[in-house]
Amino acid sequence: MKRTHHCAQLTKANLGATVSLAGWVDSVRDHGGIIFVDLRDREGVTQVKFDSNLRAQAALLKDESVIAVTGKVEPRPEAMVNKNLPTGEVEIDATELIVHNLSDTPPFPLTDAGGDKVNEDLRLTYRYLDLRRPKMRKNLAVRHRATKSVRDYFDSQGFYEVETPALFKSTPEGAREYLVPSRIHAGQFYALSQSPQQFKQILMVAGVEKYFQIARCFRDEDLRADRQMEFTQIDVEVSFIDREGIYALFEGMLKKVWKDVLNHDLPVPFPRLAYKDAMNRYGVDKPDTRFAMELADFSELFKSSGFKVFASTVAAHGSVKAFNAKGLADITQGEIGALEEIAKSLGAKGLAFIKVENGEWKSPIVKFFSEAEKAELTQKLNIENGDIIFFAAAPWERACAILGRTRLEAAQLLVKRGKMTLRADQWNFLWVVDFPLMSYDEERGSYAATHHPFTAPVVEDTGLLDSDPKVVRGQHYDVVLNGMELGGGSIRIHQPALQKKVFEDVLKIPADVVESRFGYLLKAFTYGAPPHGGIAFGLDRMCALLCGTTSIRDVIAFPKTQKAQDLMAQSPTPVTAKQLKELHISTVIPPA
C-alpha cells in the first residue's frame, strides 16, 4: 500500500480527502464501539478511527505493530482536538487496514521519560527500539542536518571531499591501534586508520589544495561518555593558509551549522586564549568559560611564608595556586573527601582549603599565615563569608591540573545547590593557541610531540629546536566549547629537512624507523610540497552538544558500551580455528 502522506502532514486543508498512511501503532484506545489508534511514523502522529467492519481487526492490534491504513480525513469533534499535534484537528476514518507485523510487548517503554529510566545496557541491547523514541529520532535528524550543513559549507568554499583508506600502516608512536592481519602477506598487519593525517598531507602535495572528509577513525582506547573506539571527524586540510585563515574558515563552518540546525547566530570571531593563560586561569587547556572561579598564583606571596609546605614548593621552582569557590562553604565532609581523592589521583598529597563562615577563617593551615598573606588572599580572591578557598602546591603543570579539576567539580556542587546555573545553550566558543611544540616525557627521558610530529613550530622559535625544545611554540590550535575540545589542528611542517630533524634530532626516532614509517611522506615533500595546515573536528561531540546531551552514545546510531561491546549484535566474539589459520595467527587467552 503506497503512502500518500506522512503522519505529521494532514491538516483541515485535507478534509474529505482519501489518504493512505503507514507506520507503527503508538497507542490503542477502545471507546466502546470505536477503536482509536495513534499511528506514528518518523515524522509524527495521526489519529485513526476504526469502527464498523474494521473494529474487530483493529482490536487485535498491539503497541509497536506495523500497519497501513486507508481512509477519509475527517474533523475531530471539538472536545477531542489535540492542540499539541500538527495533525490534532483531524483524524482518519479507516476503510482499509493492513497488518504488516504484530509486535511483541517491548522490553521497556518507548517514551522519552520511560526509556530514560531504564539501564542503558538494556536500551543498547534493543537499540532498534531505543531509536524509535522521539528524542533519539530527533538526535539522528540533528546529526543528519549538521552533517549536510558541513558538506554544503565546504562545497561553497571550493573544497573537494576525498575518501582516504581505512586500512593503513601501523604507526605505534600514536594512540593504540586496531591491527588487521593480512591473509595474503603472512605475519603482516594493516592498522585501522586513527586519522587521515598523512593521507591529507599527501593530498596537499598532490595539488588538491582544499580537502575535506567526514572521516571514520579508529582508536583502541578506553571508552568514556565523550569517547568511542570508532568515531567520526570532520577532517580538513588546506594549502597556502596560515593560522588566521584556519580560524576564519572554521568559525564560518560553525556559524553555518548553528544557524542551520538551531537557528542561532554565533558571534565571530571567537576569543583566543594562549595555552599558558588557559592553564594559569582555568587549570586546563579546554576551559569552560561559562563561569568564573579563576585560579590565581600566589607563589611570590608564599615564597618566604611561615607555612613550610608552600615555601618549600616555591623554593623547588613549583607553584602555589588557589581559587575561590564562592558560596560553597556549606560543602559536606563527604564532598570534601571526594575532592581530595580526585586531587590525589592527579598527584597531590591532599587538598588544602579554607572555609569562611561567620566571619571566621576555618582551616588547620590558617595559623601559619601572616596578616599580610591573608590580606592579599582576601583582596585577590574577593573572599567573603560563605566562601571556600582551595589551594594546590606542586610543580606548575600539576598545580594547574589539580585546581582545574577541583574547579569543575566545585561548579557542579554549586549547580546542585542551585547557586550556579550552567546553561547547555550558552555557546562559549574559544580558540586555545600557542601550545608548546614538545612536552618532556619523564618516564621515557625524551621529548614527545604535544600535538603530533607533523606540527610546524612558530617560525621565530625554530632556532631553539636544538638548544631548548621545551620553549618552542607550535602552530597548533584547539577549538573549545564549554569545557569540551571539539577539534584540534595545526599548520604542518612542509620542508623535508625540518620534518626529518624533528623526527630524528628532537623526538629521537631512529633513522631506520623514520624511513620505514614516514619515508614515503618525506620523499613526497621533496617534490614541491606547499605550505599547508588543517584541523580534525569531532562530529560526534559537536552533535552531542547540539542535542543537549553529555554522551556521544546518544548521537551515534549503534555505539559501543564503555566495555567496548555491541550488546545488540553481541560483538566482539571468538572466531573459528579455520579463520585464524587462514590469517596465520593464533590467540593467547590471559589467565583469569
Image (spheres, rainbow, N blue to C red):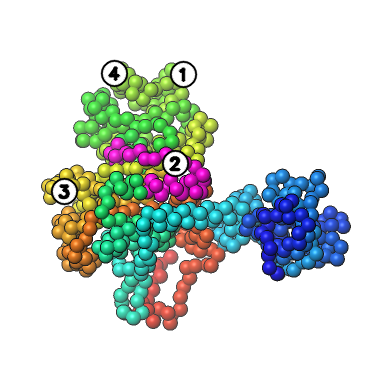
In this picture, is 269 found above or below 371?
Answer: below
Please tell me which residue lies in front, 547 or 204: 204
Q: Alpha-carbon distance for marks 4 and 2?
A: 45 Å
Q: Residues within 10 Å of mark 3 (few under 14, many from 20)?
A: some
Q: How crowded is mark 2: few (under 14 residues within 10 Å), some or many (20 or more)?
A: some
For disc 2, the marked residue is 266
Percent x, y of residue 214 = 41, 60
Q: Residue drawn at (36%, 43%), measured in percent from left and top? A: 286
The circle on residue 345 is: none
User: Given this view, does label 1 or label 2 mark the residue nearer the observer?
Assistant: 2
Q: Residue drawn at (29%, 59%), measured in percent from left and top? A: 209
**Secondary structure state at the residue bearing disc 2:** loop
User: Given this view, does label 3 or label 2 mark the residue nearer the observer?
Assistant: 2
- Give the residue type at disc 2: Leu
| Pointer 1 or 3: first along the chain | 1
Please tell me which residue lies in front, 171 or 479: 479
For disc 3, the marked residue is 462
Q: Residue drawn at (34%, 81%), measured in percent from left and top? A: 184
For disc 1, the marked residue is 358
| Pointer 4 or 2: first along the chain | 2
| Pointer 4 or 1: first along the chain | 1
User: Given this view, does label 4 or label 3 mark the residue nearer the observer?
Assistant: 3
Q: Alpha-carbon distance for marks 4 and 3?
A: 44 Å
- Give the residue type at disc 3: Thr
**Image position of 347 (left or right of 77):** left
Q: Is residue 319 visible?
A: yes
For disc 4, the marked residue is 372
